[in-house]
Image: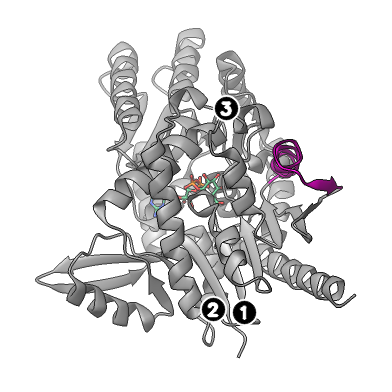
C-alpha cells in the first residue's frame, strides 16, 4: 500500500530517561499537530532525530522499537554531528544568512561536510523504507540536500519540500560557498513550498541566477524535470487555541493574572531566544515608552517570556546576557515599590500558561527582524474569543501578509514600535473588535489542517502532471 513519509530534523516526540528506561511523550508543536492526521494513519511514518543522544546500540534498538509503535523512525546523531551539522551548518551558517543576519554566519568546510553526511544518513534510512509510489514530504533548512539525494536513487518517487524559515534575496543567498549544491539538493523535489510569495520569488530568482535552469512563472525546468515552486502560508490549530481558554486550569491562571495585572495594560511578548526575533529592539521601544509617556509608569507592564534555545551557540549566549542587562536597567530605572515594568522569564511554560496569557493580555507585541511565519501572532488571535485585544506585528514576519489588521511596524523603527504601543493602549474597543474579527476569520479558515490538505493535494497534482509528461 502506498504510504506517506514525513521527514524533519526533529521527531515530534520528547524522550526522557530514568534508570535505563526511556519514556516517550508525543510533542505538540504546530507541525506535529498539523501532520498528526497523516503520520499516525496506516503505515505512514515520520523520520527524524529523536532529540537525545543515544550511543549504545542496544539502547538504540530498544528506543527504535518503542518509536516504531508510534509510527516514528529515528535517525540517531552523534555528538559531533549535533555540533557540526545541527549547531554548525544549520544554525551558524544557514540560519543567519536566511534571516538576513549574514554577519553572524560562519562558513566552515567541516560544518558543510557534516551537513552533507547527515543528509546522507537521512537518505540511507529513507531508502530502506521507501517504495515506488510512496510520497515523501521533507521539512526545513536542516535537510536541503535530501530531496536531491533521494531523487538520484529513486528518480520517480514523489517528493515535496517545505521550508519554514525565510528564503533570502539572491544577494544574501549568493554569499554561501555551497549555494549551487544547496539549490541542486532542493530541486530534487517535485513541489517546493514557502510561507510567503517573497520567499518563493527569492528562491526562483536564486535558482535562475546560480544554476543553468529555465524558470517560467513558478516552474523551474531542471534535469528534464519540472519543479513547481509555490506559496503555502502555514496555519495553526485554531480550534485548539480557541477552546483552551475554557479549560478550568487556564481559567484559574487567568484569575491569578487578574489579581496582579490590569489586562488593558499588559503587553505580552513570547519568543524562543533568537537574534532574529528582535527582543532587544522591543525592550528599547518599551523603555522609550516609559521615557516619553510617564503616565504609563506604574501602569503598563511588558510580560516577556523568552524560551531557552541554542544557548551553546556563542551569539545566543551573548544575546541572553544582553537581554538580562537591558531588563535589569529598565527595571532599576523605572520600578516603583509596587510595580515592575518588565516581567521577564527565561524558561518554557506549559501550553495552559501560554493560553492564559494569550487570553488575558490586551496587547501582544511580536516584532521579529525576520520570521518565516511566526505562529505566536496567530495563536494570540485564535485565543481572543471575545474579539478584543490588539496585535502589534512586524512587517518582516510572514504572518504580516495575512494578518493585515494588526498594527504593522518596521522592527528597526524603535519610535514606530513605541507609537504602536501607545496606539494599542488607546485603541477603542470597537476598533479592536473590528480588527480582531477580521484576523480571526483568516486564522480560522487558513488553519494548519487546511495547509496540510492544500500541500498534499498540490503534490498529488504535480505528480500526475509529471507522470503525463513522462508518458508523452
Ligand atoms: C519556525 C520558523 C515559523 C513558545 N514558547 C513556549 C511555547 N512556544 C511555542 C509557540 C509557538 C512556537 O513555540 C514558536 O513558533 P514560531 O513560529 O514563533 O517560531 P519558530 O520556533 O522559530 O519556528 C517560524 C515556524 O517554524 C512554523 O513554520 O512560523 O517563522 O522560525 O507555537 O506557542 N510552547 C510552550 N511553552 C512555551 O514557553 N509549550
Front position in the image: 8 or 328? 8
Q: Secondary structure at mark 3?
A: helix
Q: Are marks 1 and 3 in contact (CB under 8 Å)?
A: no
Camera-nearest label, 1 or 3 = 1
Seen at 58% across and 46% down, the residue is 182
- Name the residue that disc number 3 marks: 425
Quarter of the image where one finds residue 87: top left
Neighbours of disc 1 within 10 Å: few (<14), some (14-19), many (20+)? some
Question: Ligand 1 closer than 8 Å to the CB at disc 1?
Answer: no
Label 1 and label 3: CA atoms lie apart by: 53 Å
Magenta: main secondary structure: helix
- Looking at the rendered image, the quarter that the N terminus falls into is bottom right
Does the CB distance between marks 2 and 1 fall below 8 Å? Answer: yes
For the residues labelled 2 and 3, the Cα–Cα distance comes to 55 Å
Q: Is residue 386 visible?
A: no
Is 248 left, or right, of 366 in this rendering? left
Kindly identify which numbered label has been placed on residue 134.
1
Q: Position of residue 362 (x, y in %)?
A: 53, 38
**Colour theme:** one colour
The reply to whether the magenta stretch includes residue 179 is no
Query: Looking at the image, can residue 132 be seen?
Result: yes
Q: Taking 63 as reference, is 341 above or below it?
A: above
Query: Can you identify the residue that label 2 sits on?
Result: 130
- The stretch in magenta equals 196-216
Amino acid at each position: 500500500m502506498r504510504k506517506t513519509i514525513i521527514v524533519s530534523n526533529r521527531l515530534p516526540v520528547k524522550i526522557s530517561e530514568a534508570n535505563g528506561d526511556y519514556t516517550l511523550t508525543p510533542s505538540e508543536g504546530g507541525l506535529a499537530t498539523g501532520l498528526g492526521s497523516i503520520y499516525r494513519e496506516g503505515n505512514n511514518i515520520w523520520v527524524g532525530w529523536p532529540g537525545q543522544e543515544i550511543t549504545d546500540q542496544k539502547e538504540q534498538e530498544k528506543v527504535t522499537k518503542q518509536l516504531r509503535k508510534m509510527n516514528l523512525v529515528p535517525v540517531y546523531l552523534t555528538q559531533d554531528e549535533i555540533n557540526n551539522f545541527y549547531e554548525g551548518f544549520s544554525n551558524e551558517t544557514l540560519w543567519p544568512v536566511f534571516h538576513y543576519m549574514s554577519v553572524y554566519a560562519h562558513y566552515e568546510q567541516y560544518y558543510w561536510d557534516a551537513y552533507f553526511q547527515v543528509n546522507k544518513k537521512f537518505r540511507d534510512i529513507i531508502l530502506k523504507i521507501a517504495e515506488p509510489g510512496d510520497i515523501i514530504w521533507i521539512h526545513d533548512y536542516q535537510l536541503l540536500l535530501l530531496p536531491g539525494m533521494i531523487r538520484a536513487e529513486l528518480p520517480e518517487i514523489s517528493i515535496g519540500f517545505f521550508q519554514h524559515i525565510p528564503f533570502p534575496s539572491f544577494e544574501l543567498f549568493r554569499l554561501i560557498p555551497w549555494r549551487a549544491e544547496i539549490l541542486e539538493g532542493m530541486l530534487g523535489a517535485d513541489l517546493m513550498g514557502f510561507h510567503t510569495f517573497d520567499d518563493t520569488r527569492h528562491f526562483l530568482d536564486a535558482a535562475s541566477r546560480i544554476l543553468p535552469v529555465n524558470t517560467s512563472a513558478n516552474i523551474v525546468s531542471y534535469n528534464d524535470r519540472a519543479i513547481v515552486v509555490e506559496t503555502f502560508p502555514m496555519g495553526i490549530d485554531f480550534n485548539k487555541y480557541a477552546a483552551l481558554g475554557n479549560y478550568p486550569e487556564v481559567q484559574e491562571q487567568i484569575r491569578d493574572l487578574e489579581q496582579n495585572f490590569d489586562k488593558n495594560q499588559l503587553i505580552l511578548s513570547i519568543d524562543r531566544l533568537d537574534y532574529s526575533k528582535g527582543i532587544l529592539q522591543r525592550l528599547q521601544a518599551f523603555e522609550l515608552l516609559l521615557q516619553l509617556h510617564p503616565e504609563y509608569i506604574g501602569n503598563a507592564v511588558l510580560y516577556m517570556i523568552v524560551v531557552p534555545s541554542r544557548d551553546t551557540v556563542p551569539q545566543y549566549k551573548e544575546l541572553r546576557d544582553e537581554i538580562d542587562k537591558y531588563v535589569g536597567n529598565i527595571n532599576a530605572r523605572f520600578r516603583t515599590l509596587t510595580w515592575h515594568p518588565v516581567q521577564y522569564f527565561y524558561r518554557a511554560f506549559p501550553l495552559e500558561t501560554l493560553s492564559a496569557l494569550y487570553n488575558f493580555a490586551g496587547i501582544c507585541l511580536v516584532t521579529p527582524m525576520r520570521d518565516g511565519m511566526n505562529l505566536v501572532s496567530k495563536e494570540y488571535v485564535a485565543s481572543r474569543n471575545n474579539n478584543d485585544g490588539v496585535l502589534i506585528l512586524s512587517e518582516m514576519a510572514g504572518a504580516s501578509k495575512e494578518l493585515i489588521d494588526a498594527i504593522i511596524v518596521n522592527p528597526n523603527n524603535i519610535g514606530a514600535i513605541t507609537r504602536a504601543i501607545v496606539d494599542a493602549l488607546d485603541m477603542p474597543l470597537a476598533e479592536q473588535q473590528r480588527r480582531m474579527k477580521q484576523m480571526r476569520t483568516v486564522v480560522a479558515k487558513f488553519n494548519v489542517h487546511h495547509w496540510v490538505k492544500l500541500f498534499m493535494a498540490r503534490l498529488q497534482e504535480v505528480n500526475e502532471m509529471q507522470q503525463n509528461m513522462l508518458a508523452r
